[in-house]
Structure formats: structure tokens, C-alpha cells
Amino acid sequence: MTAPAWARDLLAAVCVDAGITPPGLLWRSRAGEHSTGLTRRHEGTVAVRAGSDPLDQRLTLLHEAAHWLAPLERRRRGRAVHHGRAFYAIAFDLYRRHGLAEADALRLESARYRSSLRHAVALAIPGADAALAEHRAAARARPRRTWRVLVPEHAVRLERDGRWTVCATCRQRVVGSNLARMRRARRAVRHVLMTAS
Ligand SMILES: [Zn+2]
Ligand SMILES: [Zn+2]
């Protein structure tokens, strides 16, 4: 499916402004309102799966364009940060310059990445303070699970229980990488069994 003309033009304009070569643009549609996007730097492509909401399509394309423009931020352990401050400085600037109202940009971006609001506040995006306060109030209003200790902290002693390996003390199943880690450990690993109510 070829990308619509507006999308090709928009991506080209963003890249001309930034003085960089535009990526190839792959376009597909998906069911539902929201769009998703993926930037593959090494392949030189931006792929969009376009939902039905035109505003969200536009924001998604600009979000991916921001990835194309943004240098990768790295944390100390070398892990790439995809949605950090530098990324959002570029993204919110693109949203503003290419026709998204601040309120729409904040709403659509925070629907996918809640952390974007924190960055938007730091970047002094108009309305970000209020949007963040609203998000926090909504989060507070949600009923919270309370956790309590079911079995206090103890050393894990592995034991077979049919197909499973369990902790002999609390009978919790131990699987996958956790199991491998516990088998490797020189000293017994300790854990607590919690329960939510
Ligand atoms: Zn992204
Ligand atoms: Zn246990």
C-alpha cells in the first residue's frame, strides 16, 4: 500500500527542514482508531500502520519522524533511551510546527506514553502542567490493590511437584529464568510470597 500524498509530503518537509535524507515510508492500515509506527534506522524506513483517526495518523507519522531526527540517547549502561527528553523536545516541536494543537498532541501522545507528560512539563509545553495534574488525579482515584505478605521472607528450597518446580516452604512455582537463576546461585535465594487483595 503506498503512503497517502499528505504523509509523503509531510515527511519530506520535516526532513528538508532538518537537512537530512528522508527515510522510506511504508504504509499499511489497521483496524481501530489508533495508529502505530516503527522506525528502523538501519533499514532507513519509517513504517506506519494507520488507524482511522486522521489526527492520530498525523501524530504517529510525526512521532516516527522525530525518531528519525533524534540522536539516540544512551544511559550509563549503554541502553538506548527511545522516549527521553531530547526525543520529546524534537517531537513536540514537530507537532506544534505541523498542525497539531497542543491539547491534541498531549492527549494522543500521553495515551501511548504516559511519561511524555513529565517531559512535556519540563519542556514548558502549554497545557502540560494541567494534563499531568489531571493524569495524577485520575491515577489516585483508581482503586489501588493492596499487597500483604502471605509467607514471610525465607530461603527458597527447590522441590519437584509433579511437572513443576516449587519452593518447598511456600509452594510457589519457580519457572523460566528465575528457576535458572536460583539453580545457579551459590547461596540460597530468598523471597517473600505476597498476595493482592
Ligand atoms: Zn516512539
Ligand atoms: Zn518460598
Image: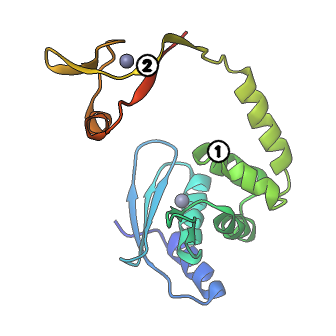
Label 2 – label 1 distance at C-alpha = 36 Å
Residue 140 position, x and y percent, is 74, 25
Residue 162 position, x and y percent, is 14, 14
Residue at 71 percent of width and 64 percent of height: 92
Residue at 66 percent of width and 48 percent of height: 115
Viewer-side residue, 179 vs 138: 179
Residue 185 position, x and y percent, is 32, 39
Viewer-side residue, 117 vs 56: 117
How many other residues sit within 10 Å of disc 1, few (<14), some (14-19) or many (≥20)?
some
Viewer-side residue, 115 vs 181: 181
**Location of the N terminus (image quadrant):** bottom left
Secondary structure of the residue carrying tag 1 is loop
Which residue is denoted by mark 2 in the rendering?
Answer: 154
Which amino acid does the dot numbered 1 rest on? Arg
Which amino acid does the dot numbered 2 rest on? His
Is 184 placed left or right of 40 in the picture?
left
Quarter of the rendering containing residue 42: bottom left
Viewer-side residue, 18 vs 113: 113
Residue 86 position, x and y percent, is 67, 69
Quarter of the rendering containing residue 135: top right
**Residue 14 to residue 170: above or below:** below
**Residue 13 to residue 79: above or below:** below
Is 98 placed left or right of 74 in the picture?
right
Residue 186 appears in the rendering: yes
Res. 114 mark: 1
Secondary structure of the residue carrying tag 2 is strand
Q: Is mark 2 within 8 Å of ligand 2?
A: yes
Residue 104 appears in the rendering: no
Q: Earlier in the sequence, mark 2 or mark 1?
A: 1
Is 136 placed left or right of 44 in the picture?
right
